[in-house]
Each structure stands twice: as structure tokens, then as C-alpha cells.
């Protein structure tokens, strides 16, 4: 494992004894103040020649090559959070000669962090992570599948603590004046980690742990956390949401809660808890492609005015470089110069006490070049703030956040900023012959964000897939209950498009006015009924138009196949029930046709619901065995002849049942499922 995924050869690879002894050739090194009761080695005397550009208090860095041993168990366990993220970055510092100008900060032991970790994370969760150090490969794989986009090996527990140690050590060194600013080149990252949940490559919340530690042990009055990772730092926000002494500012892709972590908590209207209004600032980008000009506009217009008024004593940067040019996950275009300029602006705060802690960033060269540019700036090299123009999308996002924050900040109340630009009006939809109301795609995305949030509140876990067919529009469309990998009872596969029903108070007025309009989610009643029945659930919701050969339909079919192979087949569930609504009914029927033996052995009941707007459904013949456990429901308004037409399922008319309302589908489906279960136990 180490040879395949472990740390690559590095110009600096101290042995454990070297790191603990305090002897570091050619580079300055510094033992950070202890985070535990044991004493640390005294700082070695630095040679003036070791630092070509001396300054009163130089820049520090924490880096331990052992962090490379946090790696996937095998190549089949795909994950972009790899050891090369830090090894390549440190090599770049060496190539540029910057490592000789940095003070290496060490800490001796990371297993006495329980007090600091316990402030941010639940004790049972910490114990669970520690136990992975003694787990076998099977248990490690099961632990990895328990969370969203996280893997574990037997080194993960130690190295996750080491990442927290690094963040604490550089904060202490900066606060005590041993260095003026510092970098924590650490992994795994941390800003997604919740109190009792790992997610998004993160195990412990490194920056949050360091901030709480500094508050408790050094009485740091005000801490600012700036998060420029392309993903919203949900874990940091939740930790400090009602803490007036911590200012959290995040710039991230949001896109109506469809971008990871897929929660409306990342929107600009989340401004802080009851006692901390204005202390949470979200700047949610509405699309990919943001660059230097957009980020610097946010800094100039909103971030720096608020930061100066807040007056932090210490600035922590959740420095994710997945917003950098070349990162395939982030799909943005911030250059090394852009990161350098943002760092320079932050150095004007807190008397220069700035700490950068690595978060995301999955293009190794992009991370390396961006980090090197930030290091040059921290070392005092000049950077030029260039003239720029900002995109209208970025301007709108910044202004939306500004007007939400204005009531809480004096610097914004009398701002001369113009009102947010009005988005271009969408083209009027063509009037259909049936005069039905058409809901535009953006509204559907907004509603879907609320649906995803509702699932999370019910204990569902969102799943992010990495297959090429899954474009960014389909992120956050898959959720499952937490007991998926442990429940041996009934598993429900619930497939539906992003369908919401629009209801009006009066049908006399053709205008859809907000005060007379109600939106009803047609999927949640089924979810609640399945939960009441104590079933484990996989929920897939896609926006598809039902046309047989569109890219949307192909993506939906690919998602269904991937879910079946990745989650349904490996699950310990003894039986599977399938409810598929709309165009996705065709996707599961295609899979049933191609996986006959799988379906006949696992599926004990399948309900396919056809809608008037589902589009024509090409013939999908099923085996006689599956036909016996399958029912197709069609609207009562659908002509009977349509059911016999060659463009429908070829089950025979007896398989079809009509419906008029949602309630009738739910009642009929559960009645049919009950009969299937009875047949299973009493054939």
C-alpha cells in the first residue's frame, strides 16, 4: 500500500527520531508550544545563512511526510484526496528555494489532543475513529462506506490527529510571536467534518479544533476564519454559527444547493445564530468558472470591510485550492497570483497574524503553484493588486450577501454599492395546447435544494458519484438512510424525477402569484411512509424530460445502474422493493431487462408509475417472473388505447392500474407491496 499510494520521495523526509529530537539540517526548525502536558525539545539555534531573506519574525510551516500514509486501501477505492496533494506541494517549495526561508514547526505527540478534539467533536465519534487503527480491511471498507466521500486505513486515526496538531502548532507559534505567520501543510482536510460525522474527505475539523483550542488556552478574543475552498465549509459554520467571537466567511460554489455539500445552509441568507448575527457570511457562487477578478471583487466589496470592522486578533484561512485554475472538481480559474493577492489583503488584519491551513485542491500542480505563491506573499515578497473587471454573476452573488449583512455592520449600512443587478428575464415559455403551467428549470433546482435539505433532516446521507456521465447538474440527487450497510430487512429503491406540484388558491385567475400559490412536494409523503414502515431507503431524484435518447435520460439510466451495482447488490438487505415514478420508470425497467437474475433473486415487488408528462416509453419486455411482481400505474386521464400502444411497457393490460391522486398511488403501492411480501413468506 505504501509503495502504491504512500508518500513519494521528498527532499525532506525526517525520521521519527529526527523529528522528535529537534535537529533539522539546512532549515530553521521550531518546536511549537505544547498542546499537552509533556515538554517538547527546546528550539534549536537557527543559522543566519539558513534564511536568505531574514526578518524579525519569519514565516513558519508545519509539514510531516507521514501524512502521506493516509491513502485509499486500493485503486478501486477511488478518491481524489491523495498523498501527492502535499508531497508535490512541498517539493515545489524546495524547487523554488522557499523551504530554506521557512521555519519548520514541529509538535511531538498528537495523541493527547482529546481535550481539544472534544470541544468540536463528540467523544463517541472520536473513539470510533481511534478504533480504526486496529480494524481489518473489511471493517475499514465498511467504515469508509458509512460516510460521504471518506476513506479509512489503519493510519487514518493517527494522521487525522496529526493534521489537527499541525493546525494548532502553527497557531501557537504565530500567537506567541515565534513566527509572524504560518502555513499548515496538512491532510486529511477538515472543514466538512461535523461534530459526529466525517464527510467530504474530512475526518476531524482541523481549523475549528485549532480555533477552539486558541480560545480556551490563549484567551484569543476574536478569530476570523476565511474559507476560500470551492466547497462550503459546513462543519466550520455549524461549529461557530452562534459564537459572536468568531467571524466565518466562505466563498464557494452553491448553485441552488446542487453543489456539494448540497445544503441551503450555504446560502447568503445564513447570517449567524441569535447572538451572532452577521458573524456568518456566505458568498455563494451561482456557477462554475469564477476567477481572480470575481474573488477580489468579493474581497474589496464585502470581505475586507467586514473584517476590518470585526477587528480579529487572529486570522485562520481554510485554504482550499480546488478553486484554482486546472482543478477538475472546482471548475474555477483562480490563479496563483489571485491567491497571492487575497493572502496579501488578509495580512493587513490582526497585525499580520495569519495562518493558512490546507483544505481541498485535487490538481497536484495547481495546489503546489498556488501554495508557493501564498508562501512568497507571507514571506514578504510584494504582490500587485491588478485592475480587473467582475462578472455579472459574481456581482450579483456578492451584492445579495452584502444586503443580507448590511443590518449588522456599520461599514455596510451607508455603502454606495448599487443594488444588485436584475437577472435577465427568461424567455416566455410557449403556451401548450393543454394550457398547463410550466415550471422553469431554475425553479425546479431551487425546489430540489429544499427537498435535499428535507431528506438530510430526516437522517439521509447525500451521495456524490464521480462517473463522467454525472454532470454538475446531477450532484446531490442521491441520498440514502444511514443504516444502508447494516440493515438486513427491506430495502426500498425510490426513483423519481424532480417533480413538484403547483397549486393555486383560485383557478379563475391565470396568473401564478406567490401569495396565492402553494408548492407541494410529491415525493416526501412516500419517504415518510417508508420510514414509518422501518425500511432502509435509497432515494434518487433526477430532472429528466422523458425523451428516450436525450443526454438527461442516458444520465438517469447510468445513475440507476451505478446505484444498483454500488449500493443495492452489496447491501445486506434480504429483499428489495422498487418504486419508480415518471421517466425513471423506464430506466429501472431497462436495468431489470439487462439484470434478470439479479432482479429475480432480490426484487420482491416493483411499482412503475407513468405520468402524462413522462413522455413516450419504448417497449421494455420483462421476464414472466418479474411481471408477476410488477404493477404499472397510469393516470386515469390517459386513454385506454395508449396502454396497448406499441410505445408502452409490454406487460399486458392486466398489469395496468389507473390512478387519480397521489394518495391513491401511495395506498395502491403499499397494498401491492404488502401482497408481494406475503407471497414471499407464504408462496
Image (cartoon, helix red, strand yellow):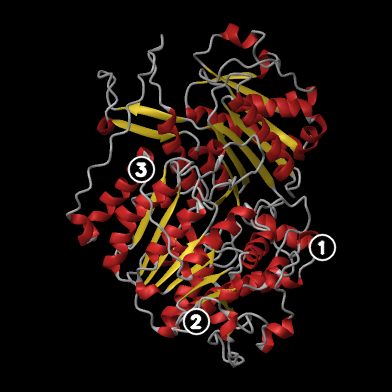
Q: Is residue 277 left or right of residue 560?
A: left
Mark positioned earlier in the residue sequence (2 or 1): 1
The label nearer to you, 2 versus 3, is 3
Q: Nearer the viewer, residue 52 or 215?
A: 52
Query: Would you say the residues marked 1 and 3 are in contact, meaning their CB atoms lie under 8 Å apart?
Result: no
Q: Would residue 386 be seen by someone viewing this image from the given angle?
A: yes
Residue 118 point in image, percent of width and height: 53, 76
Callout 2 touching callout 1 (CB < 8 Å):
no
Identify the residue at horizontal 42%, vertical 32% (top origin).
442
- Callout 3: 10 Å neighbours few (<14), some, many (20+)? few
Which residue is labeled 3 in the image? Answer: 389
Mark 1 or mark 3, which is nearer to you? 3
The residue that label 2 is drawn on is 173
Q: Residue at x 59, y 9 (%)?
A: 642
Numbered circle sitting on residue 3: 1
Q: Nearer the viewer, residue 352 or 614?
A: 352
Tell which circle, 2 or 3, labels the residue nearer the N-terminal end. 2
Residue visible at 71% across and 43% down in the picture: 568
Give the residue at x 58% y 87%. Answer: 46
Q: CA distance from mark 2 to mark 1?
A: 34 Å
In the picture, which quadrant includes the C terminus?
top right
Count neighbours of disc 2 (C-alpha within 10 A) and say few if under 14, some if 14 to 19, many if 20 or more.
many
Q: Could you say where residue 216 lies in the image, as x and y percent from the top left? A: 43, 82
Q: Secondary structure at mark 2?
A: helix
Horizontal side of residue 22 vs 336, given as left or right? right
Give the quadrant of residue 249.
bottom left
Q: Earlier in the sequence, mark 1 or mark 3?
A: 1
In the rendered image, the vertical position of residue 83 relative to residue 424, given as above or below:
below
Task: Calculate the distance from the C-alpha at mark 1 to the C-alpha at mark 3.
Answer: 47 Å
Asked if disc 2 and disc 3 are in contact, CB closer than 8 Å, the reply is: no
Amino acid at each position: 500500500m505504501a509503495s502504491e499510494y504512500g508518500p513519494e520521495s521528498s527532499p525532506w523526509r525526517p525520521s521519527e527520531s529526527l523529528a522528535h529530537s529537534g535537529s533539522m539540517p539546512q532549515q530553521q526548525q521550531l518546536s511549537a508550544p505544547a498542546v499537552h502536558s509533556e515538554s517538547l525539545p527546546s528550539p534549536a539555534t537557527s543559522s543566519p545563512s539558513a534564511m536568505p531573506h531574514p526578518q524579525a519574525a519569519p514565516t513558519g510551516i508545519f509539514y510531516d511526510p507521514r501524512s502521506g500514509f493516509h491513502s485509499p486501501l486500493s485503486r478501486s477505492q477511488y478518491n481524489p484526496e491523495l498523498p501527492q496533494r502535499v508531497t508535490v506541494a512541498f517539493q515545489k517549495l524546495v524547487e523554488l528555494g522557499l523551504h530554506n526561508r521557512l521555519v519548520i514547526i514541529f509538535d511531538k505527540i498528537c495523541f493527547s489532543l482529546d481535550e481539544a478534539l472534544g470541544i468540536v467533536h463528540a467523544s463517541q465519534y472520536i473513539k470510533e475513529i481511534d478504533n480504526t487503527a486496529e480494524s481489518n480491511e473489511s471493517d475499514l471498507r465498511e467504515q469508509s462506506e458509512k460516510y460521504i466521500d471518506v476513506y479509512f486505513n489503519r493510519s487514518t486515526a493517527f494522521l487525522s490527529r496529526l493534521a489537527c496538531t499541525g493546525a494548532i502548532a502553527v497557531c501557537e507559534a504565530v500567537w506567541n510571536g515565534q513566527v509572524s505567520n504560518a502555513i499548515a501543510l496538512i491532510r486529511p482536510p477538515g472543514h466538512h467534518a461535523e461534530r459526529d460525522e466525517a464527510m467530504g474527505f474530512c475526518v476531524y475539523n482541523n481549523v475549528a479544533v485549532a480555533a477552539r483550542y486558541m480560545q480556551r488556552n490563549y484567551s484569543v478574543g476574536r478569530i476570523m476564519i476565511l474559507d476560500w475552498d470551492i466547497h462550503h465549509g459546513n462543519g466550520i459554520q455549524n461549529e461557530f454559527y452562534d459564537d459572536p467571537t468568531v467571524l466565518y466567511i466562505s466563498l464557494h460554489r452553491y448553485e441552488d444547493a446542487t453543489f456539494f455539500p448540497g445544503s441551503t445552509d450555504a446560502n447568503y441568507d445564513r447570517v449567524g445564530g441569535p447572538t451572532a448575527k452577521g458573524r456568518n457570511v456566505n458568498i455563494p457562487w451561482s456557477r462554475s468558472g469564477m476567477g481572480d477578478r470575481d474573488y477580489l471583487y468579493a474581497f474589496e466589496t464585502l470581505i475586507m470591510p467586514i473584517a476590518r470592522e470585526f477587528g480579529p486578533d487572529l486570522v485562520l484561512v481554510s485554504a482550499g485550492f480546488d478553486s484554482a485554475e486546472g482543478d477538475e472538481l472546482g471548475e474555477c480559474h483562480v490563479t496563483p497570483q489571485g491567491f497571492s493577492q487575497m493572502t496579501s489583503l488578509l495580512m493587513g488584519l490582526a497585525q499580520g497574524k495569519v495562518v493558512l491551513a490546507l483544505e481541498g485542491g485535487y490538481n497536484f500542480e495547481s495546489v503546489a503553484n498556488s501554495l508557493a505563491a501564498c508562501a512568497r506573499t507571507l514571506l514578504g515578497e510584494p504582490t500587485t493588486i491588478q485592475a480587473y473587471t467582475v462578472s455579472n454573476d459574481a456581482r450579483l452573488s456578492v451584492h445579495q450577501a452584502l444586503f443580507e449583512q448590511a443590518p449588522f455592520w456599520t461599514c455596510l449600512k451607508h455603502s454606495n454599492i448599487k443594488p444588485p443587478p436584475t437577472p435577465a428575464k427568461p424567455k416566455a415559455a410557449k403556451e401548450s395546447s393543454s394550457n398547463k403551467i410550466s415550471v422553469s428549470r431554475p425553479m425546479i433546482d431551487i425546489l430540489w435544494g429544499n427537498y435535499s435539505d428535507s431528506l438530510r433532516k430526516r437522517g439521509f446521507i447525500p451521495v456524490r458519484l464521480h462517473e463522467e456521465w454525472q454532470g454538475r447538474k446531477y450532484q446531490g440527487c442521491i441520498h440514502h438512510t444511514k443504516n444502508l450497510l447494516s440493515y438486513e430487512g427491506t430495502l426500498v429503491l425510490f426513483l423519481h424525477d424532480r417533480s413538484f406540484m403547483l397549486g393555486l388558491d383560485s383557478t379563475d385567475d391565470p396568473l401564478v402569484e406567490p401569495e396565492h400559490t402553494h408548492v407541494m412536494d410529491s415525493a416526501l409523503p412516500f419517504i415518510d411512509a417508508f420510514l414509518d414502515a422501518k425500511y432502509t431507503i435509497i432515494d434518487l431524484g433526477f430532472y429528466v424530460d422523458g425523451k428516450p435518447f436525450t443526454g438527461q435520460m442516458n444520465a438517469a439510466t447510468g445513475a440507476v445502474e451505478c446505484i444498483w451495482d454500488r449500493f443495492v447488490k452489496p447491501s445486506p438487505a434480504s429483499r428489495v422493493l422498487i418504486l419508480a415514478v415518471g421517466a425513471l420508470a423506464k430506466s429501472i425497467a431497462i436495468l431489470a431487462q439487462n439484470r434478470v437474475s439479479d432482479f429475480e433473486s432480490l426484487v420482491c415487488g416493483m411499482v412503475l408509475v407513468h405520468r402524462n408528462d413522462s413522455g413516450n416509453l419504448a417497449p421494455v419486455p420483462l421476464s414472466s417472473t418479474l411481471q408477476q411482481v410488477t404493477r404499472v400505474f397510469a393516470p386515469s386521464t390517459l386513454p385506454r388505447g395508449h396502454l396497448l400502444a406499441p410505445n408502452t411497457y409490454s406487460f399486458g393490460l392486466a398489469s395496468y392500474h389507473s390512478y387519480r391522486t397521489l394518495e391513491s398511488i401511495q395506498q395502491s403501492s403499499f397494498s401491492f407491496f404488502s401482497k408481494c411480501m406475503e407471497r414471499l413468506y407464504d408462496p
